[in-house]
Image (cartoon, helix red, strand yellow):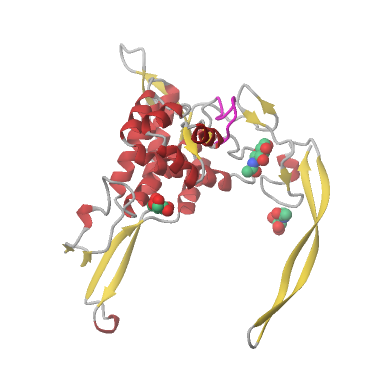
Amino acid sequence: MRVTLSLLHLCRTLPYIGLVLCGDGCVSSVLALGASIICSKMAGLAPRQRAFCQIRPDAMVAIGTGARIGTEECQHQFQHSRWNCSALGEKTLFGQELNIGCREMAFSYAILSAGIAYAIISACNHGNLTDCGCDQEKIGYYDKGKGWRWGGCSADVAHGIRFSQEFVDAREVKRNARTLMNLHNNHVGRQMLEKNVRLECKCHGVSGSCTLKTCWVTLPNFREIGFVLKERYEQAVMVEAVRGRRQMQAAFLKLKTTHGYRKPAATDLVYIDRSPSFCEEEPATGSLGTQGRMCNRTSPQADNCELMCCGRGYNTFQYTHVWQCDCKFHWCCRVTCSTCTEQIHAYTCN
Ligand SMILES: *[C@@H]1O[C@H](CO)[C@@H](O)[C@H](O)[C@H]1NC(C)=O
Ligand SMILES: *[C@@H]1O[C@H](CO)[C@@H](O)[C@H](O)[C@H]1NC(C)=O
Ligand SMILES: *[C@@H]1O[C@H](CO)[C@@H](O)[C@H](O)[C@H]1NC(C)=O
């Protein structure tokens, strides 16, 4: 018991939704502890999520995987920006997520919600979960309109989306501007996944004549979802909450710029607070600042040293990059390479 508990302690927790994030071996050991212990140990689960965890401990592995996929994609998409998703997935006591409802948080919520749906769909597709598999509505029948037959194992997209919704949205208990914002962005994330699934087809018949064609639904590479959501992030819209008549609670979101009651589109990421500059460390917003970040002197983009370091200047250091190069294949069977070296200048923000 001691051993397993210390293993649990080793696992990194993701305070964002309070999931255990660790290697597969670690997840299995945690699962072996029994659902009630795991679920009570997971930091930051909302009561409904904890109940969900008790009923479906098997799905928690996929949920943890999904959160990791989402976090890693966020870090990839923002690697050259001042805000780099660093706080997601980190075991920090404060500032795990930004404290304000800015567009960076809109992206985080959307990518995590999409990541969890994605991981659930793949787990179902691989037969890893007990209650799902291939999409039962897309098996065997001939689609007259399309001229082909559903074959293979179609990803059960609708199931994964429902699942992610049930789990991820369960965290938004109160009803205020921030929770409406989170729910909207969670939905955008899942929707972008749904819109970007692929159809794969295969021809059957003599020498590829395609007398019979079968098709099935597959998931795209998650990187594509990252790019699509990054685009939504760039076009995110500012909103504010409107109270219902005779109600104290926020009822819906409307665009902040227009005078009427125009609602944001279902595909718009939305935010309620302007982003800080992310230049300095700022407990009030949760910004970590850019001190120590790598930058690029010649880049025209956000990782340019002037922009990244906010005019504070930067340090230069040199290191030698060594790699194998000019590899030649000798018949038979030997490969010889030379060693190449290059002096690299690197820069970090003051
Ligand atoms: C399915 O389960 C196996 C064995 O636990 C694991 O190695 C694999 O990564 C899982 N695949 C998915 C997509 O969840
Ligand atoms: C992101 O930025 C923080 C603080 O500026 C830094 O400590 C961290 O190493 C960065 N993370 C990545 C993945 O670059
Ligand atoms: C810096 O930016 C330039 C221009 O975008 C690019 O060609 C170069 O590879 C970058 N250097 C590093 C170390 O990323």
**The image quarter in which residue 9 lies:** top right
**Total of numbered circles in the picture?**
0
Relative to 293, 141 lies left or right: left
Ligand 2 rendered quadrant: top right
Query: Going 62% across and 37% down the picture, which residue do you hit?
Result: 83
- Point out residue 47 in the picture as x, y percentages from the top left corner: 37, 23
Q: Is residue 114 above or below residue 13?
A: below
Residue 255 magenta-highlighted: no
Most frequent secondary structure within the magenta stretch: loop
Q: Quadrant of the C terminus?
A: top right
Of residues 244 and 256, the one nearer the viewer is 244
Indicate the quadrant where residue 53 lies: top left
190 or 58, which lies in front? 58
Q: Who's the residue at 72% across and 69% down the image?
A: 324
- Where residue 177 appears, as percent x and y from the top left, is 43, 22
Residue 101 is left or right of residue 80, and the answer is: left
Q: Is residue 292 visible?
A: yes
Q: Look at 60% across and 25% down and name the residue there.
A: 285
Magenta residue span: 88-99
In the image, residue 286 above or below residue 135: above
Q: Up-down: is 228 above or below 212? A: above
Measured as percent of width and height from the top left, residue 297 is found at 77, 49
Q: Horizontally, is 17 left or right of 104 in the view? A: left
**Residue 91 highlighted magenta (yes or no):** yes
Q: Position of residue 99 (x, y in %)?
A: 55, 25
